[in-house]
Image: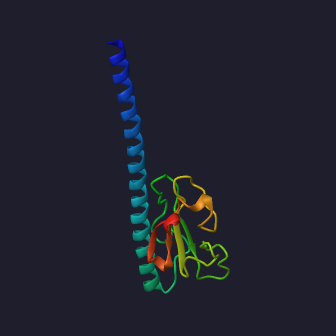
Amino acid sequence: TLLELMLGIAILAILVVVGMAQYSNYEERVRVSEAINDIAAMSLNIRQLNFNDGRLPASLDEAGHAGALDPWGRPYVYTDLTGPGNGAARKDRRLNPLNSDFDLFSMGKDGVFKPQISHRDSLDDVIRASDGRFIDLAQKY
């Protein structure tokens, strides 16, 4: 009976470990989805401001998104690329800029990013690319 009890506890422990891993994956997918929705909404707002004023806002504060945090608790990163010197533009693996108007992204789970999205530190970033036609994880671009 002691052997049966230990076997039952071992099976239960295995099920808990598998369940926790699945829940963690689900939680991360939800956070990525939230970031995608946030970036899409902010992008739309920024484009509307551009159509109304003829210029892009200098910061997210100016666009009405002061203090906006991504699902991991970090601020979103915005860069206006229409001004002089757009060397801060995020780039794909061939070093082509992702956008021609503005960059808007979340640094993702690890909170670290590099200018080139194919770099290991940037694969978990939620990015806006192709002037808004793509919003998803950098590793999917």
Q: Is residue 10 above or below residue 73?
A: above
Q: Residue at x 54, y 70 (%)?
A: 59
Q: Residue at x 47, y 60 (%)?
A: 68
User: 19 and 129: which one is in front?
Assistant: 19
How many marks are shown on the rendered structure?
Answer: 0
The N terminus lies in quadrant: top left
Q: Is residue 117 above or below residue 54?
A: above
Q: Residue at x 39, y 60 (%)?
A: 33
Q: Where is residue 85 drawn, in percent x and y? A: 68, 80
Q: Where is residue 102 drawn, in percent x and y? A: 54, 76
Taking the view exactly as shown, the residue that stands out farthest to the top is: 1
Picture quadrant of residue 37: bottom left
User: 56 and 99: which one is in front?
Assistant: 99
User: 11 and 124: which one is in front?
Assistant: 11
Q: Residue at x 52, y 83 (%)?
A: 55
Q: Where is residue 140 drawn, in percent x and y? A: 49, 67
Q: Is residue 25 left or right of residue 127?
A: left
Picture colour scheme: rainbow
Picture quadrant of residue 29: bottom left
Q: Where is residue 124 drawn, in percent x and y? A: 53, 59
User: 23 and 84: which one is in front?
Assistant: 23
